[in-house]
Image (cartoon, rainbow, N blue to C red):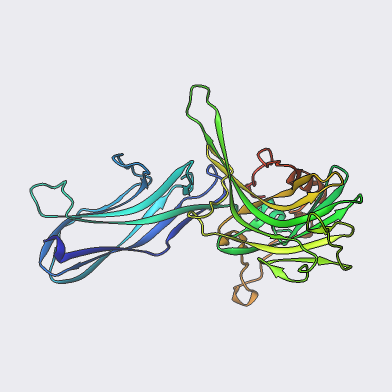
């Protein structure tokens, strides 16, 4: 009897996007249709659609993440296809989906259909479809305008080298190329560069359930591109990275690499992997926090023949592609009448130049293994 029926869940959208912080985000609606295909006559007693959480471990009871919808009227079905629309209200405070070795938060939509039977709690047929819950800042928030600006940070290393990192924006999307440019500017003589590269790193902060209430930090490289530097191949693109010099580079005979006697520009890109399986979206509030940074790194030999791996890191934010979608005002020809929507005295400056300098100073770090744990996460509040 079970083989004569098939149940499908067709969602209008595969993801649920929440806008703003958990305490300010409005509820969203998850809608779709449940489709039943049957080859025999049956009496459907009830159909229940629920959004519930997934558990990473087996033999744990799943609990509902949102109120369920239940159709309790009896329907007699003959051979054919039947469908029922549904809409579930998703609370704005719901936690975002996360799939990491340190934390696991997942959701699924479950449809359970029961037939006329003495055992009413026995599901006749059921179907599960995974759903991802995402959260992005409000489009009109000051943080969104600031994060969309280009990244251009510089820092010095031991008064010997000045490093500069440049990108178009601090917002990174999954399954997208992140184009980065780095500059090495020597401040002393006698330095040599062996290799250069770029990294996209992810930091996961989770509460550690122990006697002391400690917090566990995890860091991993989610994307990377590196190349060795040689005098004979600086004009070539190797592993997606190109090295540019104003003059012909001087080869280092014994140690390899080239002499760092002029400014060197490095252009390349890292590919952000697929969300949830390769990289997680940023989470700024709650016991679980996720952040990212982009790293320009170089392997340097100093005048004492000591190798140093130096890095310039700056905060970036991995977010869904809808994070850059702004609000669209109605077209004038579509408006029924003229309406005053703003005056010069009421206009607000979304980006303050005085705060920009402070923001850049906090965003950049340079050194041997510095992290961005202390750098603040994105602000989701609106104006």
Q: Nearer the viewer, residue 320 or 326?
A: 320
Q: Is residue 218 above or below residue 145?
A: above
Q: Is residue 283 left or right of residue 189?
A: left
Furthest residue to the left?
118
Residue appearing at x 53%, y 22% in the figure = 212
In the rendered image, residue 295, in percent from the top left (x then y), is placed at 70, 52
Q: Nearer the viewer, residue 169 or 10?
A: 169
Residue appearing at x 51%, y 55% in the figure = 278
Q: Is residue 202 left or right of residue 87?
A: right
Q: Is residue 376 left or right of residue 5?
A: right
In the rendered image, residue 247, in percent from the top left (x then y), is placed at 89, 68
Residue 16 shows in this picture: yes
Furthest residue to the top?
211
Residue 170 shows in this picture: no
In the rendered image, residue 232, in percent from the top left (x then y), is placed at 78, 68
In the rendered image, residue 305, in percent from the top left (x then y), is placed at 82, 46
Furthest residue to the bottom?
333
**Quarter assignment of residue 1:** bottom left
Q: Is residue 219 left or right of residue 61?
A: right
Instruction: Say how many tags the image has.
Output: 0
């Amino acid at each position: 009897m079970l083989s004569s029926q098939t149940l499908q869940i067709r969602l209008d959208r595969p993801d649920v996007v929440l806008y703003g912080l958990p305490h300010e985000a409005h509820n969203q609606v998850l809608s779709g249709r449940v489709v039943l295909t049957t080859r025999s006559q049956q009496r459907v007693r009830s159909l229940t659609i629920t959004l519930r959480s997934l558990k990473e471990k087996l033999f744990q009871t799943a609990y509902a993440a949102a109120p369920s919808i239940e159709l309790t009227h009896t329907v007699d079905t003959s051979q054919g296809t039947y469908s029922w629309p549904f809409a579930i209200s998703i609370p704005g405070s719901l936690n975002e989906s996360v799939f990491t070795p340190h934390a696991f938060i997942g959701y699924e939509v479950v449809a359970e259909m029961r037939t006329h039977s003495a055992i009413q709690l026995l599901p006749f047929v059921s179907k599960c479809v995974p759903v991802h819950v995402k959260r992005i800042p409000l489009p009109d928030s000051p943080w969104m305008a600031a994060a969309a600006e280009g990244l251009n940070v510089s820092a010095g290393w031991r008064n010997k080298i000045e490093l500069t990192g440049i990108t178009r924006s601090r917002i990174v999307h999954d399954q997208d190329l992140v184009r980065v440019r780095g500059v090495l500017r020597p401040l002393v003589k006698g330095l040599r560069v062996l290799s250069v590269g770029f990294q996209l790193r992810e930091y996961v902060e989770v509460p550690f359930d122990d006697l002391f209430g400690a917090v566990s930090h995890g860091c991993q490289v989610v994307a990377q591109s590196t190349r060795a530097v040689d005098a004979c191949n600086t004009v070539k693109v190797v592993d997606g990275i190109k090295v540019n010099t104003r003059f012909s580079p001087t080869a280092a005979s014994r140690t390899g690499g080239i002499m760092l006697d002029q400014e060197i520009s490095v252009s390349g890109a890292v590919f952000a992997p697929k969300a949830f399986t390769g990289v997680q979206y940023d989470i700024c509030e709650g016991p679980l926090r996720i952040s990212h940074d982009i790293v320009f790194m170089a392997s340097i030999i100093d005048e004492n023949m000591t190798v140093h791996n130096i890095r310039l890191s700056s905060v970036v934010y991995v977010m869904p592609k809808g994070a850059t979608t702004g609000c669209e005002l109605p077209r004038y020809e579509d408006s029924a009448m003229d309406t005053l929507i703003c005056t010069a005295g009421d206009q607000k400056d979304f980006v303050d130049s005085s705060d920009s300098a402070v923001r850049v100073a906090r965003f950049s770090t340079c050194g041997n293994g510095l992290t961005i744990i202390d750098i603040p996460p994105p602000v989701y509040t609106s104006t």
